[in-house]
Image: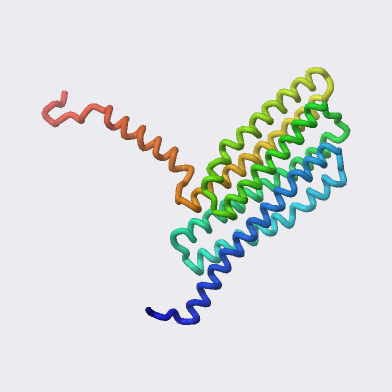
Amino acid sequence: MTDIPGDQMETRRTYHQQLEDIQADIVRMAALVTEGVPRTTQVLLDHDLGGAQEIIDGDDPLDALAVETEERCYTVFALQQPLASDLRGLITAVRMVAEIERSGDLVVNIAKGTRRIYGTEYTPRLRGLISRMGEEAARLFRLAIDSYAEGDAAMAAALDDLDDRLDDLHQDYIAEIFEASAAGVIEVQAAVQLALIGRYYERIGDHAVNIGERVRYMVTGWLPEQTGAAREAARQRAADESEPPPLRSDEGV
């Protein structure tokens, strides 16, 4: 058995430590979002302007960590030239940085919405739906990151179906806003802002689903785009088979 030189072993240890550090930073970034969702939900329900400003100001560390982590991914790409599963892991990491950073922006958007509707009284049903949307969005995001940390493709694949619950809550929420606005309980401008806030929760769930798709790619090599590409290839084959054969030169008109 051939001995591996010590300097090469040290290089490989450093390389794998870099990969582990990138994964750890992504989990840290995601933790800021999963903690931020219930915080911003409580701020919204309590009309807490001070808390809203803290959430807005607290977005900078997440943005800084996102930039740093993405740059480190590119450094590993350039210097280590990873292959196979390591390559998929780095591609996934770059994509996930964007998904997490955008989710953090949505948390901030909810806090900003709190300031725009300050003084608006929520109906009891509206308060309940806001609370449940916040819980569901945080749960989806937490499961998405758990699937990444554990390399669990089955959990990642389940997120798309789990997201239906948040979509249903969002539909009920929009219906309640319309009813409250029509009854004059909520002013039109406040209703518009509340509708936007509901959309922010829904988008956090969508980002969690996207993370799940990236985890599936990392673990199995499956890409979400492959399903659509396969359908398009099948349509093209069917179209080709349905076309009449080309005319021979002696069959011309």
Q: Nearer the viewer, residue 74 or 129?
A: 129
Name the image quarter holding the N terminus. bottom left
The residue at 54%/73% (across/down) is 13
In percent of the image, x 61 and y 33: which residue is there? 164
Q: Return the x and y of residue 125 as percentages of the image width and height.
A: 78, 26
Foreground residue, 249 or 92? 92
Question: Hey, which residue is sitting farthest top in the picture?
Answer: 183
Q: Say left or right for 203 vs 244.
A: right
* In the foreground, 72 or 218: 218
Q: In which quarter of the image is residue 165?
A: top right
* Residue 10, placed above or below residue 228: below
- The image shows a total of numbered marks equal to 0
Q: Residue at x 38, y 79 (%)?
A: 2
Residue 168 is situated, as x and y percent measured from the top left of the image, at 65, 29
Q: Quadrant of the C terminus?
A: top left
At 20% from the left and 30% from the top, the residue drawn is 246
Task: Return the residue nearer the eye: 251 or 131.
Answer: 131
Q: Quadrant of residue 66?
A: bottom right
Query: Horizontal and vertical percent for residue 83?
Result: 44, 62
**Residue 35 point in image, percent of width and height:** 74, 49
Q: Quadrant of residue 233?
A: top left
Q: Is residue 244 left or right of residue 156?
A: left
Q: Which colour scheme is used?
A: rainbow
